[in-house]
Image: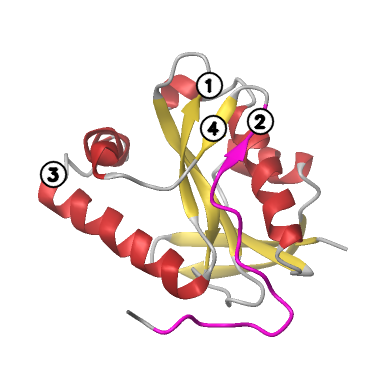
Amino acid sequence: MAAVLTVPGHERMPCHLETERLILRPWTESDAGALGALHAERGNGTPEVEDIRALIAKQLAATAKTGIALLPIRRRDEGDFIGYCGLIIGRSTLEEPEIAYELFRRAHGRGYATEAAEAVLGAAKATGRQRLWSTVGAGNTPSLRVLEKLGFERDHVSTEDNGEVVWLTRSLL
């Protein structure tokens, strides 16, 4: 088994989160089809199921190693997969990870991203972390609005190969 990366003073993130309308829980192989469909909405074609299964295995291994998780989101009443939300290292660090989320277009505009992210903020706070980051494409106005609702503040903007990226932070104190 891989060694667990530890950050002094930080607990493992809870991997089962529930809100009024949503359930976030660890990935299973049965999530592969829905995750592949979500990735296809990005406009780069439909990924192979084997590639998505490998991505899920990689995510589960990362959670086991780091103690933080990116979790699938299911609507409580309908039981359907609508996206994912959680903590990742991304462009940041394990001590101050990034919050990340992506939802099917059909789930946009209903407050699901905000609701899931609020649950993840609570889970992040429970780990003892003091600050989170988020990075978002400058043109992604809906995600920037979600982060603003959650209390994230702009820190700086960087330019990458795919355009400008807005860096935001949120204190958990």
At label 3, the amino acid type is: Val
The answer to whether the residues at label 4 and label 1 have Cβ atoms under 8 Å apart is: yes
| Residue, disc 1 | 76
Pointer 2 local density, CA inside 10 Å: few below 14, some 14–19, many at least 20: some
| Residue, disc 4 | 23
| Residue, disc 3 | 49
The answer to whether the residues at label 2 and label 1 have Cβ atoms under 8 Å apart is: yes
| Residue at point 25%, 33% (across, down) | 37
The answer to whether the residues at label 2 and label 4 have Cβ atoms under 8 Å apart is: yes
Q: Assign the N terminus to one quadrant of the image.
A: bottom left
Pointer 1 local density, CA inside 10 Å: few below 14, some 14–19, many at least 20: some
Q: Earlier in the sequence, mark 3 or mark 2?
A: 2
The answer to whether the residues at label 4 and label 3 have Cβ atoms under 8 Å apart is: no
Secondary structure of residue under mark 3: helix
Q: Earlier in the sequence, mark 3 or mark 1?
A: 3
Q: Which mark is residue 19?
A: 2
Classify 104 as above or below 90. above
Q: Earlier in the sequence, mark 4 or mark 1?
A: 4
Pointer 4 local density, CA inside 10 Å: few below 14, some 14–19, many at least 20: many
| Residue at point 74%, 80% (across, down) | 9
| Residue at point 74%, 50% (across, down) | 122
Q: Can residue 61 be seen in the rendering of this structure?
A: yes
Q: Earlier in the sequence, mark 2 or mark 1?
A: 2
